Structure formats: C-alpha cells, structure tokens
C-alpha cells in the first residue's frame, strides 16, 4: 500500500515523484547530513544522482564505487522513499548471509539515517532457511547420547507455544542461528533446517520459527535484507511455490539492490542447482508404500530403490577430493551413464503407474503430489546430466551423505526472463564491477541487455593511510614470523583472511600452540556464529579475527581493524564450478583464475580503510610473490594507485 504521508518530504501529486525525491536527496546531502556531522563527499553526491536515473528509467544500473564513497547511504535514500511511494519494500541482497547483520547493526548506515532523518525505517531480515532451527531435527537428537547436550541447551530456549496450546497471538518468531551463537557450525548443522526437511507436511510448521519469521518479514514496508543466495532461491522457486499454493519466499519488491553485485552470477548458479540424494528418494518412496498401492507398484518401487543405491555406490567410488573445496570431482564413466539410463526408464514407469494409481485414489493426494514433483525433478536433472552440455556436476559428502549436484553452467537466459525483463530499478553496488570501465562482461553473464552504469573512485588518502607489506621469503623469514611481525606492529587488531578452512586450521594450530602468539587473542570463524564473532572482534579492540568468508562486505571502521593479513592469494579452487568456467575460455588462467583472484584481493584489501581517519597495514604473506615477478606486478597493479609496496 502506498504511504505518501510517510515520505520525508511533502509530495506534490502534480509534479513527477522522482524529481521531488531528487530535490530532497539534495537537501539531505547538502544540508541535513553535514549539519548532523556527517562527512559528505563529492563522489557520494555524484553516485546519488546517477542512481536517480535507475529509479526514473526503471532499469538495472551498475554502480561501481570505490571504498568510502558512502554508497549505502546513497542507495538507501532512494530505495526507502521509492518503497513508500510504490507501497512495496525494497530488497537489499547482500553477498553473504554473514553480512546481513552488518547492515542493521546499531552503528550501521540504516540506524544512522533513521536517527538523523527521523525516518523510523521498517527493516526486516530474511535469512536463508538453514539459519533457522528445525524443531523436528532437534527432537530426533533426544535419544542420541552424543548429541543430547546440544539438544538440551537448545530445547531449553524454545518458546512454550511450540508444544503447548496457546492463542495464536502469542506466537512470535524465534530459532535464528544468531540466538545460538555458542554452537559451533558443526553443532548447528545437527539442529538447523536443511534441504531434506519436508516442511510442507510438517505438523510443526505453524509453530516453527522459520515459518513465523517469514510471516514477519513479508510485512516489511521499507526494506527487506537478505543474501543473494536467498534472493535467487526465491526467484527459482517462485513458480513451484505458487503452484503448491504457497507464498513466495519474498514479497514483490519496489527496487532490488545487489550489494557486492559482482557475485550475483555465482548466487544464481548455486540456487539453480539440483541436489540428488539416495536416502531422500528412498524415504519418499518408502512412505509411498505405506499406502494401499498395487503389488506391481510396490515391486517397481523396490527396484528403483536398489537401482538408486547402486548408482550412488558407483558415484561414490568415482569421486576425487579437491584441495580448498568441499566439492568432489566426479569422473563420469560409461557404466554410470548406462545405469542412469536404466534408472530413468524405471522412474518413467513409476510416473505412469502413479497416474493409474491416482485414478484409484489409493494414495493421499498431497503425498502423491510430493512424489510426482520429486520424480519430475529427478528426470529433469538426470537429463541435464546425460546431455553434459552447459552443466557442471559435482558431489558433496556432508556427514557421510553423498549428494549429486547438477548445476546449469550459464544462467543468463533464465535471469533475463525471470528477473531483468521486469520494469524495476535493479542496483548493482560494488567497488569491482567492470574491467577498466567496461561492464559488458558482467552484464552478458547476467543476461542484462539494457543497463546504466558509472564508476567513481575512492575518496581516501591511501598514500598517507595505508602501508602495504609483502615479505621476501627466505630462510630467516617464514610465514608464521611474517604474520607475527604485522600483528605486533598493530598490537593485535588484525583481520586474517584465508582462502579455505584448511588454511585457517593450519594457522589456528600454530596460533593456539606457539608461545609467540600467546599475547594475542584470536577469534576463529566456525567456532561460533559469525556475526557474534565479528561483534566481539569489534568490541574487544586488540583481538585478531581469522576468517574465510569476510573478504567482502565487512565494515569495521576505527582501530579494531588496523591490519589486514592475506594468508594466501585468493585464487579460485580447481573445483567443478570453476573448471566449468575455465572450459568456456581460451586462456583459463588469464580469463578466470587471475581476474577472480585480483577482484577478491581488492575486496580483501578494502576491509582496512573504512573512514578517512582509518590507518593501517595490509600484508600479503603469500610465498608465490617472492618468486613470481609477473604475479607480483599484477598484484601491485590492483593496489590503490598512490600506495607503494614495502618488501620486508
Ligand atoms: S516446518 Fe520445516 S524447519 Fe520447521 S520444524 Fe517442520 S520440518 Fe523443521
């Protein structure tokens, strides 16, 4: 519903809205914010007026703005007012689930604007499903001696309405990962929602924290903040949820902002992937047998289950571990392809048999629908697998369960049709969207044909405020000593960025056992929920934070973050997803590996200077820079122009 009265300026219906919004944004930047003590930069004002074009023309815009431009405030002003004018919330899709909380923290831009402009901004978080507790999974831990401690600590926190009859008005949302910050990621994985929970038939769904949270955020009037992964999941499941009579994950948006928008293609690919598991198929089919089905159907089901088991044994024995990735490479054999053909034939026979069964009314309608949808998905995914063109396939083995993942390589056509053909302002905000001002590579990979774009440089004085150190590795200096040297210089206050958990673990063992590191306190990603670790890092000034997922989006101004230590250059893993990209290029290193690494490196370096008064050190302690002059030059070229490297 439109709410003109909630606009922060008096709206004259006889004049174009965007023109009046632009005038107000001018007042905010030239008068209101400076008066409130905000540091306003020309780059920020330039960016704001560029964004206005996107709202006027309702087109995607690539807003490439260097660190410190103040891009969040610029897009928030437009997004909030436009949401109130149109009567639908704006969606802000962040790069990572961990960054959602960053936007709404008490010292963040939304809170600041809310206070200075007295806007009372209605912002709600839409986290991914795995960020919520699953009561059903929790209950299953009750009799598990090893996990009963986790069960007890979590079940004590459940609201009484989960198990008791109380008025619905008393229902409220709960079960957010953040509430259980003391649980490690591994412990959390025992109790959170996962892709194999069948929520649509769950008797607890009306009392489930995830369902209640959805009901809450869908009513947001100004902003909904989610991750890009979740936004894409919303897009891909939109039709099927509607078919099943379910509401889409997200409500219709007045505008969509992709923060760190250069990552959207990966999010789209991830969301479009099909996940196939033997145990899930078995569970669904065994449930089918509980109905009064014909004997021949029962035999067919048993046949399918044993075929599926054999197929997954074949898959399991054809996988290779990949360093730095949780994905396993799958070697596709001719036996596997033959097996899939026969498996598909059986699935087809079952689909036909179920049509007949539905006429006999032997299976409950809803259950039949679930089986049919699952068989449909299997057939489609396996067809893609057989065709081999434009798909990427890999295997995961979480908790000993093998999952076959089949993902389309190119998503541009689907994105064009389902997202960017809409007449909506889509804003891509990032410091790294183009190659020297040319946005066509990103636009093409996202299926965007008609777009606006601009680039603004960072306003910070890097020459004075940033020192970059690259150690010359020799017998006297090892990686450990190089890291310690930086930590000593800034007396802790370091963000250490790792490429994967293996690297982080290697350092963790050193940091926790070696005497020289004893004087410093370290926080490690994975030990607790990430946003609470980030908070502790910010509040306990001298701590060091070791992370894998904070190359992007982390915004900690002030002395708490005085050095960024890059443990190794962030080259992508040799996993199937990146191999799929490499296959489509002439020179994979130059076209995929190097640009990815440089872009991520720039993002990592960008964590250091967040305000004009921030100062500190960036140290890149990768041994390869000591022996590879070309790589050294390429890395030097992406540093802020005025900064020179100190070899230590
Ligand atoms: S609705 Fe889904 S997440 Fe919630 S308790 Fe049921 S199965 Fe678990």
Image (cartoon, grey):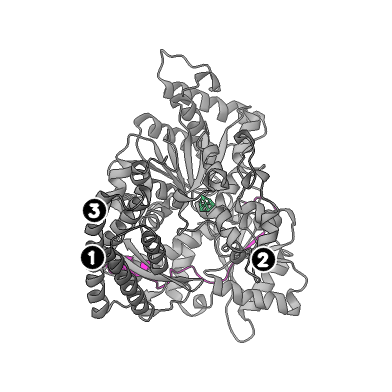
The crowd level at tag 2 (other Cα within 10 Å; few <14, some 14-19, many 20+) is some
- Answer few, some or many: residues within 10 Å of disc 3's Cα (few below 14, many 20 plus, some between 14 and 19): few
Mark 1 neighbour density, 10 Å: few (under 14) some (14–19) many (20 or more) = few
Badge 3 or badge 1: first in the primary sequence = 3
Q: Is residue 245 above or below residue 543?
A: above
Residue found at x 23% / y 79%: 334
Q: CA distance from mark 3 to mark 2?
A: 44 Å
Residue 450 relative to residue 55: left or right: left
Residue nearest the observer in this picture, 56 or 438? 56
Q: Is mark 2 within 8 Å of ligand 1?
A: no
Using the numbered discs, state the Cα–Cα distance from disc 3 to disc 1 in whole angstroms: 32 Å
Q: Is residue 578 magenta?
A: yes
For the residue pair 527 and 605, the one nearer the viewer reads as 527
The residue located at (75%, 77%) in the rendering is: 516
Q: Which residue was labeled with disc 1?
A: 389
Q: Which residue is mark 3?
A: 355
Q: Is mark 3 within 8 Å of ligand 1?
A: no
Task: Report if residue 127 lies within the magenta region.
Answer: no
Say which label, 3 or 2, has the lower sequence index: 2
Q: CA distance from mark 2 to mark 1?
A: 47 Å
Q: Which marked residue is nearer to the observer: mark 3 or mark 2?
A: 3
């Amino acid at each position: 519903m439109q709410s003109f009265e909630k606009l922060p300026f008096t709206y004259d219906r006889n004049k174009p809205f965007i023109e009046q919004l632009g005038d107000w944004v001018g007042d905010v930047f030239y008068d209101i914010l400076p008066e409130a003590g905000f540091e306003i930069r020309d780059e920020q004002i330039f960016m704001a007026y560029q964004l206005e074009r996107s709202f006027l023309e309702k087109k995607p815009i690539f807003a490439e703005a260097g660190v410190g431009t103040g891009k969040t405030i610029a897009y928030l002003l437009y997004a909030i007012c436009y949401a109130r004018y149109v009567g639908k919330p704006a969606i802000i899709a962040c790069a990572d689930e961990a960054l959602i909380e960053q936007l709404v923290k008490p010292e963040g831009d939304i809170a600041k604007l809310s206070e200075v402009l007295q806007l009372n901004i209605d912002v709600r978080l839409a986290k991914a499903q795995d960020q919520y507790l699953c009561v059903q999974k929790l209950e299953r831990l009750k009799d598990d001696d090893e996990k009963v401690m986790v069960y007890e600590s979590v079940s004590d926190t459940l609201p009484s309405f989960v198990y008791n009859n109380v008025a619905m008005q008393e229902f409220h949302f709960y079960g957010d990962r953040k509430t259980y910050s003391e649980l490690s990621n591994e412990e959390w994985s025992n109790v959170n929602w996962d892709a194999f929970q069948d929520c649509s038939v769950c008797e607890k769904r009306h009392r489930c924290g995830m369902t209640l949270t959805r009901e809450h955020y869908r009513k947001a009037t100004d902003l909904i903040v989610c991750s890009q992964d979740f936004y894409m999941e919303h897009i891909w499941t939109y039709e099927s949820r509607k078919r099943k009579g379910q509401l889409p994950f997200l409500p219709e948006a007045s505008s969509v902002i992709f923060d760190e928008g250069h990552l959207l293609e990966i999010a789209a690919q991830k969301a479009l992937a099909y996940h196939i598991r033997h145990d899930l198929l078995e569970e669904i089919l065994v449930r089918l047998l509980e109905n009064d089905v014909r004997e021949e159907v029962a035999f067919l089901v048993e046949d399918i289950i044993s075929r599926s088991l054999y197929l997954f044994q074949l898959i399991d024995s054809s996988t290779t571990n990949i360093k730095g990735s949780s994905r396993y490479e799958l070697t596709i054999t001719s036996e596997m392809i033959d097996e899939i053909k026969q498996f598909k034939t059986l699935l087809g026979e079952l689909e036909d048999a179920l049509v007949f069964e539905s006429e006999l009314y032997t299976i409950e309608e809803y259950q039949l629908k679930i089986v049919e949808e699952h068989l449909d998905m299997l057939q489609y995914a396996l067809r893609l697998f057989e065709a081999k063109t434009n798909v990427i396939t890999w295997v995961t083995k979480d908790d000993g369960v093998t999952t076959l993942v089949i993902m389309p390589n190119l998503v541009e056509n689907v994105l064009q049709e389902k997202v960017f053909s809409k007449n909506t302002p889509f804003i891509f905000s990032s410091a790294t969207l183009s190659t020297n001002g040319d946005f066509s590579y990103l636009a093409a990979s996202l299926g965007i044909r008609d777009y606006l774009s601009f680039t603004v440089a960072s306003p910070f004085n890097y020459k004075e405020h940033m020192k970059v150190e690259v150690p010359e590795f020799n017998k006297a200096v090892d990686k450990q000593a190089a890291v310690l040297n930086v930590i000593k210089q800034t007396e802790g206050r370091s963000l250490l960025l790792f490429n994967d958990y293996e690297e982080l673990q290697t350092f963790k063992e050193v940091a926790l056992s070696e005497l020289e590191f004893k004087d410093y306190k370290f926080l490690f990603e994975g030990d607790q929920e990430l946003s609470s670790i980030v908070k502790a890092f910010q509040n306990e000034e001298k701590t060091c934070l070791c992370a894998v997922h904070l190359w992007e989006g982390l915004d900690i101004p002030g002395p708490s973050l005085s050095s960024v230590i890059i443990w190794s250059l962030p080259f992508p893993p040799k996993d199937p997803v990146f191999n799929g990209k490499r296959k489509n290029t002439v020179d994979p290193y130059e076209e995929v590996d190097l640009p990815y690494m440089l872009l991520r490196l720039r993002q990592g370096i960008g964590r250091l200077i967040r305000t004009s008064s921030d100062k500190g050190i960036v140290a890149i302690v990768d041994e390869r820079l000591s022996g590879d002059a070309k790589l050294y030059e390429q890395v030097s070229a992406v540093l802020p122009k005025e900064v020179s490297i100190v070899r230590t």
